């Protein structure tokens, strides 16, 4: 349970630094990359594959949408119309989404096991 509480506070830190430093592309990229390493370390890097998959595919999707539509745009651009910090931010979102799924899945599994007795 401690692990999930720590991840929640890490999420709050990610939100706070993104709000505070969104204009400083390289600084926010570095801060989010550092927070990503901490997030992955919590689970002994077991979710690293998910992190990189979501970081890459989420960012590529944003690049395609930004460059091929007028759906939205970013004031702070860095690479192909999107900020550099978007890459680790997508990865963090992916790992936290998987963590939330696993948290609720474990609770449901525990309930099923308790009713079988």
Image (cartoon, helix red, strand yellow):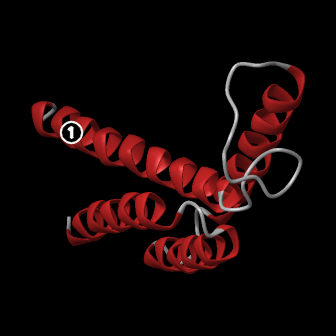
Q: Secondary structure at mark 1?
A: helix
* Residue for point 80% across, 26% down: 65
Compare residues 27 and 60 and report the one nearer the observer: 27
**Is the N terminus in the top left, top right, bottom left or bottom right quadrant?**
bottom left
Residue 109 x %, y %: 28, 39
Q: Quadrant of residue 19?
A: bottom left
Specify few, some or many for label 1: CA neighbours under 10 Å numbering under 14, 14-19, or 20 or more: few
User: Of residues 1 and 82, which is closer to you in this image?
Assistant: 82
Q: Residue at x 37, y 45 (%)?
A: 100
Q: Position of residue 37 (x, y in %)?
A: 57, 78
Q: Position of residue 17 (x, y in %)?
A: 43, 67
The quadrant the C terminus occupies is: top left
Q: What's the residue at 78%, 42% (across, down)?
A: 57
Of 54 and 47, the residue lying toward us: 54
Q: Is residue 110 above or below residue 5?
A: above
Name the residue that disc number 1 marks. 113
> Could you tell me which residue is drawn at 31 percent across and 48 percent down?
103
Q: How many numbered callouts?
A: 1
15 sits to left or right of 30 = left
Residue 29 image position (x, y, % from top left): 65, 71
Residue 99 placement, left or right of 1: right
Q: Is residue 19 above or below residue 26?
A: above
Above or below, 32 against 116 in this view is below
Task: In this rendered view, identify the residue nearer to me: 76 or 99.
Answer: 76
């Amino acid at each position: 349970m401690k692990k999930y509480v720590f991840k929640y506070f890490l999420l709050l830190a990610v939100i706070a630094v993104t709000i505070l430093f969104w204009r400083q592309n390289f600084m926010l990229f570095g801060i989010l990359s550092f927070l990503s390493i901490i997030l992955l370390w919590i689970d002994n890097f077991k979710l690293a594959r998910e992190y990189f998959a979501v970081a890459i595919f989420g960012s590529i999707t944003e690049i395609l949408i930004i460059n091929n539509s007028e759906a939205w745009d970013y004031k702070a651009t860095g690479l192909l119309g999107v900020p550099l910090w978007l890459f680790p931010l997508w990865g963090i979102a992916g790992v936290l989404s998987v963590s939330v799924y696993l948290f609720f899945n474990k609770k449901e599994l525990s309930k099923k096991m308790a009713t079988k007795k």
